[in-house]
Protein backbone atom coordinates (compact mmCIF):
# COMPACT_ATOMS: atom_id res chain seq x y z
CA UNK A 1 0.00 0.00 0.00
CA UNK A 2 1.05 3.60 -0.68
CA UNK A 3 0.67 6.49 1.76
CA UNK A 4 -0.87 9.67 0.37
CA UNK A 5 -2.71 12.70 1.74
CA UNK A 6 -6.32 13.43 0.77
CA UNK A 7 -7.76 16.71 1.99
CA UNK A 8 -5.16 16.92 4.75
CA UNK A 9 -5.62 13.36 6.00
CA UNK A 10 -2.98 10.69 5.52
CA UNK A 11 -4.40 7.45 4.12
CA UNK A 12 -3.20 4.24 2.51
CA UNK A 13 -4.05 3.64 -1.15
CA UNK A 14 -3.69 0.71 -3.51
CA UNK A 15 -0.98 1.64 -6.06
CA UNK A 16 -2.69 -0.59 -8.63
CA UNK A 17 -5.86 1.55 -8.53
CA UNK A 18 -6.30 5.09 -9.90
CA UNK A 19 -6.44 8.12 -7.63
CA UNK A 20 -10.23 8.43 -7.91
CA UNK A 21 -10.61 4.96 -6.41
CA UNK A 22 -8.46 5.96 -3.45
CA UNK A 23 -10.66 9.01 -2.88
CA UNK A 24 -13.89 6.99 -3.07
CA UNK A 25 -12.49 4.29 -0.77
CA UNK A 26 -11.96 7.00 1.85
CA UNK A 27 -15.48 8.37 1.46
CA UNK A 28 -14.31 11.46 -0.40
CA UNK A 29 -16.72 12.41 -3.18
CA UNK A 30 -15.11 13.03 -6.55
CA UNK A 31 -17.56 13.40 -9.47
CA UNK A 32 -17.28 11.07 -12.44
CA UNK A 33 -18.96 10.36 -15.77
CA UNK A 34 -16.67 8.30 -17.95
CA UNK A 35 -15.07 6.47 -15.03
CA UNK A 36 -16.70 3.29 -13.73
CA UNK A 37 -14.91 0.93 -11.33
CA UNK A 38 -15.81 -2.05 -13.50
CA UNK A 39 -14.48 -0.55 -16.75
CA UNK A 40 -11.10 0.54 -18.05
CA UNK A 41 -10.53 4.30 -17.39
CA UNK A 42 -10.23 6.60 -20.39
CA UNK A 43 -10.28 10.12 -18.93
CA UNK A 44 -12.60 11.55 -21.57
CA UNK A 45 -15.08 13.60 -19.53
CA UNK A 46 -12.52 15.38 -17.25
CA UNK A 47 -15.13 15.99 -14.54
CA UNK A 48 -13.09 14.08 -11.92
CA UNK A 49 -10.31 16.66 -11.73
CA UNK A 50 -8.64 17.28 -8.39
CA UNK A 51 -5.69 19.40 -7.32
CA UNK A 52 -2.41 17.61 -6.65
CA UNK A 53 0.50 19.39 -5.00
CA UNK A 54 3.68 19.38 -7.00
CA UNK A 55 7.24 18.89 -5.88
CA UNK A 56 8.69 21.48 -3.46
CA UNK A 57 9.03 24.78 -5.21
CA UNK A 58 6.66 23.82 -8.02
CA UNK A 59 3.02 24.89 -8.29
CA UNK A 60 0.20 22.40 -7.79
CA UNK A 61 -1.73 21.19 -10.81
CA UNK A 62 -5.20 19.91 -11.60
CA UNK A 63 -5.34 16.34 -12.89
CA UNK A 64 -8.01 13.85 -13.93
CA UNK A 65 -8.23 11.50 -10.95
CA UNK A 66 -9.38 8.52 -13.04
CA UNK A 67 -6.16 8.47 -15.09
CA UNK A 68 -3.69 9.45 -12.38
CA UNK A 69 -1.87 6.70 -10.49
CA UNK A 70 -1.16 7.18 -6.81
CA UNK A 71 2.41 7.73 -5.72
CA UNK A 72 4.11 7.85 -2.34
CA UNK A 73 3.68 11.19 -0.57
CA UNK A 74 1.10 12.53 -3.04
CA UNK A 75 -0.92 15.46 -1.59
CA UNK A 76 -4.45 15.61 -3.00
CA UNK A 77 -7.11 18.28 -2.52
CA UNK A 78 -10.60 17.72 -3.90
CA UNK A 79 -12.37 20.85 -2.59
CA UNK A 80 -10.06 23.69 -3.61
CA UNK A 81 -11.36 26.58 -5.71
CA UNK A 82 -9.09 25.53 -8.58
CA UNK A 83 -10.60 22.00 -8.62
CA UNK A 84 -14.18 23.30 -8.49
CA UNK A 85 -13.53 25.92 -11.20
CA UNK A 86 -12.14 23.25 -13.52
CA UNK A 87 -15.14 20.98 -12.93
CA UNK A 88 -17.55 23.84 -13.61
CA UNK A 89 -15.84 24.49 -16.93
CA UNK A 90 -16.26 20.84 -17.88
CA UNK A 91 -19.90 20.90 -16.81
CA UNK A 92 -20.56 24.02 -18.87
CA UNK A 93 -19.17 22.25 -21.90
CA UNK A 94 -21.24 19.11 -21.29
CA UNK A 95 -24.42 21.10 -20.70
CA UNK A 96 -23.92 23.18 -23.85
CA UNK A 97 -25.86 20.71 -26.00
CA UNK A 98 -27.79 18.83 -23.37
CA UNK A 99 -31.60 19.16 -23.79
CA UNK A 100 -33.70 20.70 -21.04
CA UNK A 101 -36.06 17.74 -20.75
CA UNK A 102 -35.44 16.66 -17.16
CA UNK A 103 -39.20 16.62 -16.36
CA UNK A 104 -39.79 13.79 -18.86
CA UNK A 105 -36.46 11.99 -18.52
CA UNK A 106 -36.44 8.54 -16.90
CA UNK A 107 -33.09 9.34 -15.29
CA UNK A 108 -34.44 12.37 -13.43
CA UNK A 109 -33.96 11.86 -9.72
CA UNK A 110 -30.88 9.67 -10.11
CA UNK A 111 -29.01 11.60 -12.79
CA UNK A 112 -25.36 12.44 -12.14
CA UNK A 113 -25.56 15.42 -14.48
CA UNK A 114 -28.34 16.95 -12.38
CA UNK A 115 -26.51 16.24 -9.13
CA UNK A 116 -23.13 17.60 -10.20
CA UNK A 117 -24.61 20.72 -11.83
CA UNK A 118 -26.37 21.46 -8.54
CA UNK A 119 -23.34 20.68 -6.38
CA UNK A 120 -20.98 22.79 -8.48
CA UNK A 121 -23.41 25.68 -8.86
CA UNK A 122 -23.42 25.35 -12.64
CA UNK A 123 -26.84 26.89 -13.26
CA UNK A 124 -26.24 29.17 -16.24
CA UNK A 125 -24.97 28.79 -19.77
CA UNK A 126 -23.12 31.61 -21.56
CA UNK A 127 -23.52 30.52 -25.17
CA UNK A 128 -26.30 31.72 -27.45
CA UNK A 129 -25.84 29.18 -30.24
CA UNK A 130 -28.64 26.62 -30.67
CA UNK A 131 -28.14 23.10 -29.35
CA UNK A 132 -27.17 20.53 -31.93
CA UNK A 133 -30.06 18.52 -33.35
CA UNK A 134 -29.70 14.79 -32.90
CA UNK A 135 -31.93 11.75 -33.13
CA UNK A 136 -34.34 10.98 -30.30
CA UNK A 137 -35.92 7.65 -29.37
CA UNK A 138 -33.49 5.67 -31.49
CA UNK A 139 -34.02 1.95 -31.00
CA UNK A 140 -30.84 -0.04 -30.40
CA UNK A 141 -32.64 -3.37 -30.26
CA UNK A 142 -35.31 -4.97 -28.17
CA UNK A 143 -34.02 -3.70 -24.80
CA UNK A 144 -32.45 -0.23 -25.09
CA UNK A 145 -33.53 3.07 -26.63
CA UNK A 146 -31.06 5.92 -27.24
CA UNK A 147 -31.69 9.67 -27.00
CA UNK A 148 -28.65 11.05 -28.81
CA UNK A 149 -29.33 14.60 -27.61
CA UNK A 150 -28.71 13.58 -24.00
CA UNK A 151 -25.52 11.60 -24.63
CA UNK A 152 -22.34 13.15 -23.19
CA UNK A 153 -20.07 10.62 -24.97
CA UNK A 154 -18.65 9.17 -21.78
CA UNK A 155 -18.21 5.86 -23.70
CA UNK A 156 -19.19 3.70 -20.72
CA UNK A 157 -21.58 1.76 -22.97
CA UNK A 158 -18.86 1.16 -25.55
CA UNK A 159 -16.43 -0.13 -22.93
CA UNK A 160 -19.05 -2.33 -21.27
CA UNK A 161 -19.19 -4.52 -24.36
CA UNK A 162 -15.44 -4.56 -24.90
CA UNK A 163 -14.44 -5.00 -21.24
CA UNK A 164 -17.28 -7.08 -19.76
CA UNK A 165 -19.08 -9.14 -22.40
CA UNK A 166 -15.94 -9.25 -24.60
CA UNK A 167 -18.01 -8.65 -27.73
CA UNK A 168 -17.84 -5.10 -29.11
CA UNK A 169 -21.23 -3.85 -30.30
CA UNK A 170 -21.09 -0.07 -29.86
CA UNK A 171 -18.71 2.62 -31.05
CA UNK A 172 -18.28 6.40 -31.08
CA UNK A 173 -19.08 7.33 -34.67
CA UNK A 174 -18.11 10.60 -36.31
CA UNK A 175 -15.72 13.39 -35.32
CA UNK A 176 -15.97 16.48 -33.15
CA UNK A 177 -19.47 17.84 -32.76
CA UNK A 178 -20.74 15.10 -35.08
CA UNK A 179 -19.74 12.30 -32.71
CA UNK A 180 -22.55 9.95 -31.64
CA UNK A 181 -22.91 6.50 -30.14
CA UNK A 182 -23.96 3.90 -32.67
CA UNK A 183 -23.97 0.17 -33.29
CA UNK A 184 -21.75 -1.34 -35.95
CA UNK A 185 -23.46 -1.04 -39.35
CA UNK A 186 -26.69 -0.06 -37.54
CA UNK A 187 -27.21 -3.64 -36.40
CA UNK A 188 -29.41 -4.04 -33.32
CA UNK A 189 -27.74 -4.94 -30.04
CA UNK A 190 -27.90 -8.58 -29.04
CA UNK A 191 -27.08 -10.68 -26.02
CA UNK A 192 -28.38 -11.21 -22.51
CA UNK A 193 -26.70 -8.21 -20.86
CA UNK A 194 -28.00 -5.16 -22.74
CA UNK A 195 -29.97 -3.84 -19.77
CA UNK A 196 -26.73 -2.99 -17.97
CA UNK A 197 -26.31 -0.07 -20.38
CA UNK A 198 -29.24 1.74 -18.75
CA UNK A 199 -27.61 1.23 -15.33
CA UNK A 200 -24.18 2.56 -16.21
CA UNK A 201 -25.31 5.48 -18.40
CA UNK A 202 -24.74 8.51 -16.11
CA UNK A 203 -27.41 10.56 -17.87
CA UNK A 204 -30.70 9.63 -19.54
CA UNK A 205 -29.28 8.79 -22.96
CA UNK A 206 -29.65 5.00 -22.72
CA UNK A 207 -32.90 3.89 -21.14
CA UNK A 208 -34.73 0.60 -20.80
CA UNK A 209 -37.67 0.14 -23.11
CA UNK A 210 -39.57 -1.89 -20.54
CA UNK A 211 -39.11 0.64 -17.72
CA UNK A 212 -39.42 3.78 -19.86
CA UNK A 213 -42.13 6.09 -18.44
CA UNK A 214 -43.30 3.44 -15.96
CA UNK A 215 -42.51 5.35 -12.76
CA UNK A 216 -40.62 8.27 -11.29
CA UNK A 217 -37.63 6.93 -9.44
CA UNK A 218 -38.31 8.92 -6.28
CA UNK A 219 -41.58 6.99 -5.90
CA UNK A 220 -39.78 3.63 -5.96
CA UNK A 221 -38.97 1.72 -2.79
CA UNK A 222 -35.74 -0.26 -3.09
CA UNK A 223 -35.26 -3.59 -1.31
CA UNK A 224 -32.05 -5.61 -1.30
CA UNK A 225 -32.64 -9.17 -2.48
CA UNK A 226 -31.37 -12.04 -4.65
CA UNK A 227 -32.23 -12.96 -8.24
CA UNK A 228 -33.96 -16.33 -8.74
CA UNK A 229 -33.64 -16.87 -12.48
CA UNK A 230 -30.58 -19.11 -12.24
CA UNK A 231 -28.32 -20.67 -9.63
CA UNK A 232 -25.86 -17.75 -9.75
CA UNK A 233 -27.99 -15.81 -7.28
CA UNK A 234 -27.02 -12.30 -8.35
CA UNK A 235 -27.46 -9.61 -5.72
CA UNK A 236 -30.23 -7.28 -6.83
CA UNK A 237 -32.35 -4.32 -5.85
CA UNK A 238 -36.10 -4.93 -6.18
CA UNK A 239 -37.82 -1.60 -6.82
CA UNK A 240 -41.55 -1.33 -6.23
CA UNK A 241 -43.96 1.52 -6.86
CA UNK A 242 -45.65 2.59 -3.64
CA UNK A 243 -45.26 -0.98 -2.26
CA UNK A 244 -47.85 -2.24 -4.74
CA UNK A 245 -46.05 -3.53 -7.82
CA UNK A 246 -42.48 -4.37 -8.81
CA UNK A 247 -41.45 -1.96 -11.55
CA UNK A 248 -37.74 -2.55 -11.89
CA UNK A 249 -35.03 -5.03 -10.93
CA UNK A 250 -31.43 -3.87 -11.02
CA UNK A 251 -28.08 -5.38 -10.03
CA UNK A 252 -26.57 -4.64 -6.63
CA UNK A 253 -22.81 -4.69 -6.24
CA UNK A 254 -21.45 -7.94 -4.85
CA UNK A 255 -17.76 -8.49 -5.50
CA UNK A 256 -17.99 -12.25 -4.91
CA UNK A 257 -21.03 -12.99 -7.09
CA UNK A 258 -22.04 -10.58 -9.84
CA UNK A 259 -20.03 -7.39 -9.24
CA UNK A 260 -22.05 -4.56 -10.86
CA UNK A 261 -23.91 -6.63 -13.48
CA UNK A 262 -26.85 -8.93 -14.07
CA UNK A 263 -28.39 -10.62 -17.10
CA UNK A 264 -31.55 -9.44 -18.85
CA UNK A 265 -33.34 -12.70 -18.03
CA UNK A 266 -33.26 -11.86 -14.34
CA UNK A 267 -33.77 -8.14 -14.89
CA UNK A 268 -36.97 -8.63 -16.89
CA UNK A 269 -38.46 -11.50 -14.88
CA UNK A 270 -41.37 -9.34 -13.74
CA UNK A 271 -44.32 -11.33 -15.11
CA UNK A 272 -44.27 -13.99 -12.34
CA UNK A 273 -44.10 -11.18 -9.77
CA UNK A 274 -46.93 -9.06 -11.12
CA UNK A 275 -49.74 -11.58 -11.52
CA UNK A 276 -53.19 -10.15 -10.88
CA UNK A 277 -55.28 -11.75 -8.15
CA UNK A 278 -58.03 -14.14 -9.14
CA UNK A 279 -61.48 -12.54 -9.07
CA UNK A 280 -63.02 -12.30 -5.61
CA UNK A 281 -64.49 -15.62 -4.54
CA UNK A 282 -62.81 -17.53 -7.37
CA UNK A 283 -59.83 -19.86 -7.46
CA UNK A 284 -58.68 -19.71 -11.08
CA UNK A 285 -57.91 -16.77 -13.35
CA UNK A 286 -55.04 -15.25 -11.36
CA UNK A 287 -53.18 -15.53 -8.10
CA UNK A 288 -54.75 -17.74 -5.49
CA UNK A 289 -56.25 -15.54 -2.75
CA UNK A 290 -56.93 -18.18 -0.10
CA UNK A 291 -57.03 -21.92 0.38
CA UNK A 292 -59.16 -23.94 -2.02
CA UNK A 293 -60.77 -27.37 -1.59
CA UNK A 294 -62.31 -29.55 -4.27
CA UNK A 295 -66.10 -29.60 -4.09
CA UNK A 296 -68.93 -30.61 -6.36
CA UNK A 297 -68.18 -27.74 -8.73
CA UNK A 298 -64.38 -28.06 -8.74
CA UNK A 299 -61.99 -26.11 -6.53
CA UNK A 300 -63.80 -23.77 -4.16
CA UNK A 301 -62.48 -21.16 -1.75
CA UNK A 302 -62.06 -22.41 1.80
CA UNK A 303 -60.86 -21.35 5.23
CA UNK A 304 -57.14 -22.06 5.77
CA UNK A 305 -57.64 -23.92 9.04
CA UNK A 306 -60.38 -26.16 7.65
CA UNK A 307 -58.29 -26.85 4.53
CA UNK A 308 -55.26 -27.82 6.65
CA UNK A 309 -57.40 -30.16 8.76
CA UNK A 310 -58.75 -31.79 5.61
CA UNK A 311 -55.24 -32.08 4.12
CA UNK A 312 -53.91 -33.75 7.27
CA UNK A 313 -56.78 -36.27 7.32
CA UNK A 314 -56.39 -37.02 3.61
CA UNK A 315 -52.61 -37.55 3.75
CA UNK A 316 -52.86 -39.69 6.87
CA UNK A 317 -55.44 -41.95 5.27
CA UNK A 318 -53.34 -42.38 2.09
CA UNK A 319 -49.86 -43.45 3.27
CA UNK A 320 -46.96 -43.41 0.83
CA UNK A 321 -47.05 -39.65 0.24
CA UNK A 322 -44.55 -37.98 -2.08
CA UNK A 323 -43.11 -34.65 -0.91
CA UNK A 324 -41.77 -32.56 -3.80
CA UNK A 325 -40.72 -28.92 -3.36
CA UNK A 326 -39.90 -26.14 -5.77
CA UNK A 327 -36.25 -25.17 -6.38
CA UNK A 328 -37.44 -21.67 -5.42
CA UNK A 329 -37.97 -22.85 -1.85
CA UNK A 330 -35.76 -21.02 0.65
CA UNK A 331 -33.66 -22.84 3.21
CA UNK A 332 -36.27 -22.01 5.83
CA UNK A 333 -39.10 -23.40 3.70
CA UNK A 334 -37.05 -26.45 2.81
CA UNK A 335 -36.43 -27.26 6.47
CA UNK A 336 -40.18 -27.08 7.12
CA UNK A 337 -40.78 -29.37 4.12
CA UNK A 338 -38.10 -31.73 5.48
CA UNK A 339 -39.95 -31.98 8.79
CA UNK A 340 -43.19 -32.68 6.91
CA UNK A 341 -41.51 -35.42 4.88
CA UNK A 342 -40.18 -37.01 8.06
CA UNK A 343 -43.68 -36.96 9.57
CA UNK A 344 -45.02 -38.66 6.43
CA UNK A 345 -42.06 -41.07 6.24
CA UNK A 346 -41.36 -39.73 2.75
CA UNK A 347 -38.13 -39.05 0.88
CA UNK A 348 -37.83 -35.26 0.33
CA UNK A 349 -37.22 -34.28 -3.28
CA UNK A 350 -37.25 -31.12 -5.42
CA UNK A 351 -38.14 -30.42 -9.05
CA UNK A 352 -34.96 -30.20 -11.10
CA UNK A 353 -35.61 -28.94 -14.66
CA UNK A 354 -32.99 -29.52 -17.33
CA UNK A 355 -30.40 -26.77 -17.93
CA UNK A 356 -31.50 -24.14 -20.43
CA UNK A 357 -29.67 -22.53 -23.34
CA UNK A 358 -28.89 -19.30 -21.46
CA UNK A 359 -25.61 -20.49 -19.92
CA UNK A 360 -22.71 -18.15 -20.68
CA UNK A 361 -19.19 -17.38 -19.47
CA UNK A 362 -20.19 -14.25 -17.55
CA UNK A 363 -22.99 -14.86 -15.02
CA UNK A 364 -25.87 -17.05 -16.16
CA UNK A 365 -25.38 -20.70 -15.17
CA UNK A 366 -28.18 -22.13 -17.32
CA UNK A 367 -29.56 -23.83 -14.19
CA UNK A 368 -33.13 -22.66 -13.45
CA UNK A 369 -32.91 -23.80 -9.80
CA UNK A 370 -31.85 -20.85 -7.60
CA UNK A 371 -31.51 -22.96 -4.44
CA UNK A 372 -30.28 -26.25 -5.88
CA UNK A 373 -27.16 -26.36 -3.72
CA UNK A 374 -29.06 -25.46 -0.58
CA UNK A 375 -31.64 -28.18 -1.14
CA UNK A 376 -28.98 -30.78 -1.90
CA UNK A 377 -27.11 -29.84 1.27
CA UNK A 378 -30.31 -30.41 3.29
CA UNK A 379 -30.66 -33.89 1.83
CA UNK A 380 -33.29 -33.33 -0.87
CA UNK A 381 -33.04 -35.44 -4.00
CA UNK A 382 -33.14 -33.85 -7.45
CA UNK A 383 -36.03 -35.10 -9.57
CA UNK A 384 -36.47 -34.26 -13.26
CA UNK A 385 -40.03 -33.16 -14.15
CA UNK A 386 -40.64 -36.32 -16.22
CA UNK A 387 -39.46 -38.54 -13.37
CA UNK A 388 -41.55 -36.59 -10.87
CA UNK A 389 -44.67 -37.00 -13.01
CA UNK A 390 -43.99 -40.73 -13.35
CA UNK A 391 -43.68 -41.05 -9.58
CA UNK A 392 -46.85 -39.02 -9.03
CA UNK A 393 -48.77 -41.24 -11.44
CA UNK A 394 -48.35 -44.27 -9.15
CA UNK A 395 -48.34 -42.53 -5.76
CA UNK A 396 -51.41 -42.65 -3.51
CA UNK A 397 -50.92 -39.04 -2.36
CA UNK A 398 -48.49 -36.15 -2.76
CA UNK A 399 -47.57 -32.71 -1.48
CA UNK A 400 -46.19 -30.20 -3.98
CA UNK A 401 -44.80 -27.12 -2.25
CA UNK A 402 -43.26 -23.85 -3.35
CA UNK A 403 -43.44 -21.04 -5.85
CA UNK A 404 -43.81 -22.23 -9.49
CA UNK A 405 -43.81 -25.91 -8.53
CA UNK A 406 -46.81 -26.67 -10.77
CA UNK A 407 -45.33 -24.66 -13.64
CA UNK A 408 -41.97 -26.43 -13.39
CA UNK A 409 -43.59 -29.87 -13.36
CA UNK A 410 -45.62 -28.87 -16.44
CA UNK A 411 -49.37 -28.37 -16.51
CA UNK A 412 -49.75 -30.69 -19.50
CA UNK A 413 -48.14 -33.58 -17.64
CA UNK A 414 -50.01 -32.82 -14.42
CA UNK A 415 -53.32 -32.91 -16.31
CA UNK A 416 -52.66 -36.58 -17.18
CA UNK A 417 -52.31 -37.69 -13.55
CA UNK A 418 -54.99 -40.13 -12.37
CA UNK A 419 -57.95 -38.76 -10.44
CA UNK A 420 -57.33 -41.25 -7.65
CA UNK A 421 -54.16 -39.36 -6.66
CA UNK A 422 -54.77 -37.27 -3.54
CA UNK A 423 -52.84 -34.10 -4.27
CA UNK A 424 -52.11 -31.09 -2.04
CA UNK A 425 -50.36 -28.10 -3.63
CA UNK A 426 -48.80 -24.98 -2.12
CA UNK A 427 -48.20 -22.55 -4.99
CA UNK A 428 -48.82 -18.99 -6.13
CA UNK A 429 -51.56 -20.09 -8.54
CA UNK A 430 -53.95 -23.01 -8.52
CA UNK A 431 -54.55 -25.21 -11.54
CA UNK A 432 -57.73 -26.88 -12.76
CA UNK A 433 -56.31 -30.39 -12.36
CA UNK A 434 -58.62 -33.34 -11.80
CA UNK A 435 -56.17 -34.74 -9.25
CA UNK A 436 -55.73 -31.50 -7.26
CA UNK A 437 -57.78 -31.79 -4.08
CA UNK A 438 -56.49 -28.93 -1.93
CA UNK A 439 -54.51 -25.80 -2.85
CA UNK A 440 -52.87 -23.21 -0.63
CA UNK A 441 -51.50 -19.83 -1.76
CA UNK A 442 -47.87 -18.88 -1.07
CA UNK A 443 -45.86 -15.65 -1.43
CA UNK A 444 -43.51 -15.00 -4.35
CA UNK A 445 -39.80 -14.61 -3.62
CA UNK A 446 -40.14 -10.81 -3.43
CA UNK A 447 -42.83 -11.17 -0.76
CA UNK A 448 -40.85 -13.24 1.73
CA UNK A 449 -37.58 -13.31 3.63
CA UNK A 450 -35.16 -16.20 3.67
CA UNK A 451 -31.97 -17.54 2.14
CA UNK A 452 -30.81 -19.31 -0.99
CA UNK A 453 -27.40 -20.89 -1.50
CA UNK A 454 -25.92 -20.30 -4.94
CA UNK A 455 -23.88 -22.56 -7.18
CA UNK A 456 -20.64 -21.53 -5.44
CA UNK A 457 -21.98 -22.05 -1.92
CA UNK A 458 -22.56 -18.36 -1.17
CA UNK A 459 -25.65 -17.36 0.75
CA UNK A 460 -28.11 -14.99 -0.95
CA UNK A 461 -30.56 -13.09 1.23
CA UNK A 462 -34.21 -12.52 0.32
CA UNK A 463 -36.07 -9.58 1.86
CA UNK A 464 -39.72 -8.57 1.70
CA UNK A 465 -40.10 -6.00 -1.08
CA UNK A 466 -43.90 -6.24 -1.29
CA UNK A 467 -46.48 -7.44 1.21
CA UNK A 468 -48.20 -10.64 0.06
CA UNK A 469 -51.99 -10.60 -0.49
CA UNK A 470 -54.00 -10.31 2.70
CA UNK A 471 -54.74 -14.01 3.32
CA UNK A 472 -51.51 -15.47 1.95
CA UNK A 473 -49.30 -16.96 4.67
CA UNK A 474 -45.64 -17.90 4.62
CA UNK A 475 -45.00 -21.37 3.19
CA UNK A 476 -42.82 -22.51 6.10
CA UNK A 477 -45.57 -21.64 8.57
CA UNK A 478 -48.19 -23.49 6.53
CA UNK A 479 -46.01 -26.59 6.25
CA UNK A 480 -45.23 -26.48 9.96
CA UNK A 481 -48.95 -26.22 10.73
CA UNK A 482 -49.69 -29.20 8.48
CA UNK A 483 -46.92 -31.22 10.17
CA UNK A 484 -48.37 -30.40 13.58
CA UNK A 485 -51.85 -31.50 12.52
CA UNK A 486 -50.47 -34.74 11.07
CA UNK A 487 -48.93 -35.62 14.41
CA UNK A 488 -52.41 -35.58 15.93
CA UNK A 489 -53.91 -37.83 13.23
CA UNK A 490 -53.22 -41.59 13.37
CA UNK A 491 -51.41 -42.69 10.18
CA UNK A 492 -53.56 -44.85 7.90
CA UNK A 493 -56.77 -43.82 9.67
Image (tube, rainbow, N blue to C red):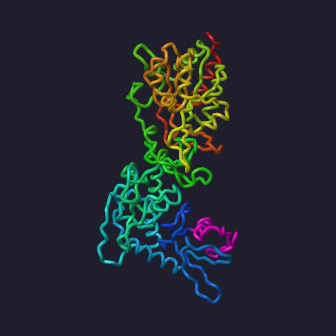
Most distant residue in the front direction: 185
* Above or below, 185 relative to 84: above
List x then y, in percent, for residue 357. 50, 41
Most distant residue in the top direction: 493
- Which quarter of the figure has residue 6? bottom right
List x then y, in percent, for residue 468. 49, 36
Magenta segment: does it hold 7?
Answer: yes
Q: Residue at x 31, y 71 (%)?
A: 131
List x then y, in percent, for residue 370. 57, 39
Horizontal side of residue 137 vs 166, given as left or right:
left
Horizontal side of residue 39 vs 375, given as left or right:
left
* Above or below, 242 relative to 55: above
Which contiguous range is marked in magenta?
Answer: 1-28
Magenta segment: does it hold 192?
Answer: no
Most distant residue in the bottom direction: 57
Q: Residue at x 54, y 55 (%)?
A: 260
Say which quadrant the N terminus sits in: bottom right
Q: Viewer-proximal residue, 320 or 278?
A: 320
* Above or below, 148 relative to 270: below
Q: Residue at x 44, y 69 (%)?
A: 118
Say which quadrant the C terminus sits in: top right
List x then y, in percent, for residue 5. 65, 75
Amino acid sequence: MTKIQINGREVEADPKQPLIRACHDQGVDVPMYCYHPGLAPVGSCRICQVEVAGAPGQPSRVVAACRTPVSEGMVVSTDTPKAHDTRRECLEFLLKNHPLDCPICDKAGECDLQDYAFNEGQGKGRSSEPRRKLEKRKSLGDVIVLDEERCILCSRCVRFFTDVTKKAQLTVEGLGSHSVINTYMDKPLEGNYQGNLADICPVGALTSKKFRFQARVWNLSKTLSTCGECSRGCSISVESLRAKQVKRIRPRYNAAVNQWWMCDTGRHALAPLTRALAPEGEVLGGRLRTAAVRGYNGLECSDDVAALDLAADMLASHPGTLVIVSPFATQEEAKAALALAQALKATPQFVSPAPNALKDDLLHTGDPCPNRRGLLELGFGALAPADALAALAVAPSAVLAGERVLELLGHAGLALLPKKLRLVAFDVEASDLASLDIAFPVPTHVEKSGHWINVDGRVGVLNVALPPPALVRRLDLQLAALTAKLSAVPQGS
